[in-house]
Amino acid sequence: MSHHLGFAYVSAFSRAFRRYNGSTVGDHQAEARVTVRLLR
């Protein structure tokens, strides 16, 4: 996915994601899973 967004390396995407969102990709995914469970 990171290559489709213009990042040469996954690590570069991860750093940019953390800078922009204030959390890691893994944190974001975990939060999304909890939200989906709550909506069911």
Image: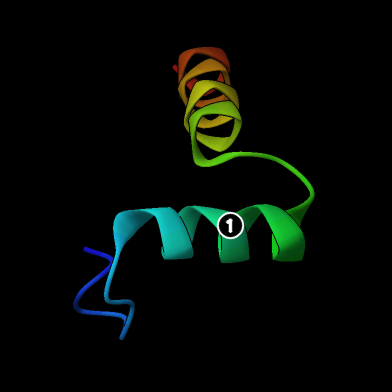
- Is 5 on the left-hand or right-hand side of 27? left
What is the three-letter code of the residue carrying label 1? Answer: Arg
Dividing the picture into quadrants, the one containing residue 6 is bottom left
**Depth order, front residue of 36/20:** 20
Residue 18 vs 16, above or below: the answer is above
Question: Residue shown at 41%/54% (left/top)?
Answer: 11
- Is 30 on the left-hand or right-hand side of 4? right
Question: Residue shown at 47%/31% (left/top)?
Answer: 29
- Furthest residue to the right? 22
**Depth order, front residue of 31/35:** 31
Q: Secondary structure at mark 1?
A: helix
Dividing the picture into quadrants, the one containing residue 15 is bottom right
Question: Residue shown at 60%/28% (left/top)?
Answer: 27
How many labels sit on residues? 1
Residue 39 vs 25, above or below: the answer is above
Residue at the disc numbered 1: 15
The quadrant of the rendering that contains the N terminus is bottom left
Q: Position of residue 5 (x, y in %)?
A: 31, 80
- Furthest residue to the bottom? 6
Scheme of colours in the image: rainbow
Question: Residue shown at 20%/79% (left/top)?
Answer: 4
Q: Position of residue 21 (x, y in %)?
A: 73, 56
**Depth order, front residue of 38/15:** 15
The quadrant of the rendering that contains the C terminus is top left
Q: Residues within 10 Å of mark 1 (few under 14, many from 20)?
A: some
